[in-house]
């Protein structure tokens, strides 16, 4: 669901010229990437020491986490920079269609459904990791609400709201990046 939503948001955002929707798509795909890196690192970090790595593979998780955090922070800075440039260029044509609004709404509904499904499984299995994943999905729903507000604002005649929403989502991406590096 995250992959399909992420790709759809980026493609529709590109055609609608919505930086907020593109940023939200990147946010969705970054969650997916984070999950894959965690799975990969967890699988390989428990390998025993060998000739190439005499101290073992325990630091692979740290390296993967820091690398992902740096990439996400860089992406957030790039999104913010472009959105702030757009604030200073009101002549940028925005073709916000009903499809862009519907994708943002679908994202909110999907993320909330994922939250409820994962929370149910977390409670049934008594899993803190699943509970944390559920809350992460709910935070993604909040970023999609910000995008929904930005797109709605543009459609109502407030073109700067897309850039403001893009900066808000970029801040959420940067927070994830900083958190990964810090941890």
Image (spheres, grey):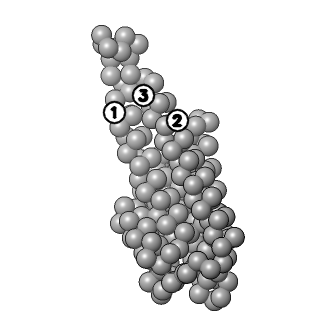
Q: Position of residue 180 (x, y in %)?
A: 56, 40
Q: Residues within 10 Å of mark 1 (few under 14, many from 20)?
A: few
The residue positioned 56% from the left and 47% from the top of the image is: 74
Q: Earlier in the sequence, mark 1 or mark 3?
A: 1
Comparing marks 2 and 1, which lies closer to the viewer?
2
Residue on which the image places disc 2: 66
> Label 1: which residue?
43
Query: Mark 3 near mark 2, Cβ–Cβ under 8 Å?
Result: no
Give the secondary structure at mark 2: helix
User: Looking at the image, can residue 119 be seen?
Assistant: no
Q: Around disc 2, counting alpha carbons within 10 Å, would you say few (fewer than 14), some (14 to 19), or many (20 or more)? A: some
Q: Name which quarter of the figure residue 4 lies in.
A: bottom left
Q: Quadrant of the N terminus?
A: bottom left
- Please name the residue that numbered disc 3 is placed on: 60
Q: Is residue 158 above or below residue 26?
A: below
Pick whichever of labels 3 and 2 is earlier in the sequence: 3
Judge left or right: residue 51 versus residue 29: left
């Amino acid at each position: 669901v995250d992959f399909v939503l992420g790709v759809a948001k980026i493609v529709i955002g590109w055609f609608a010229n919505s930086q907020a929707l593109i940023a939200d798509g990147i946010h969705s795909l970054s969650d997916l990437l984070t999950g894959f890196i965690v799975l990969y690192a967890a699988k390989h970090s428990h390998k025993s020491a060998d000739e190439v790595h005499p101290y073992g593979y325990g630091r692979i998780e740290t390296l993967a986490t820091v690398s992902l955090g740096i990439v996400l922070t860089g992406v957030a800075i790039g999104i913010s920079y472009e959105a702030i440039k757009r604030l200073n260029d009101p002549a940028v044509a925005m073709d916000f269609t009903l499809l862009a609004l519907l994708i943002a709404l679908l994202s909110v509904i999907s993320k909330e459904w994922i939250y409820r499904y994962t929370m149910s499984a977390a409670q049934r299995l008594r899993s803190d990791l699943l509970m944390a994943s559920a809350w992460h999905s709910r935070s993604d729903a909040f970023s999609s609400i910000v995008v929904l507000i930005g797109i709605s604002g543009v459609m109502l005649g407030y073109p700067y709201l897309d850039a403001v929403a893009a900066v808000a989502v970029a801040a959420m991406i940067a927070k994830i990046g900083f958190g990964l590096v810090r941890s």
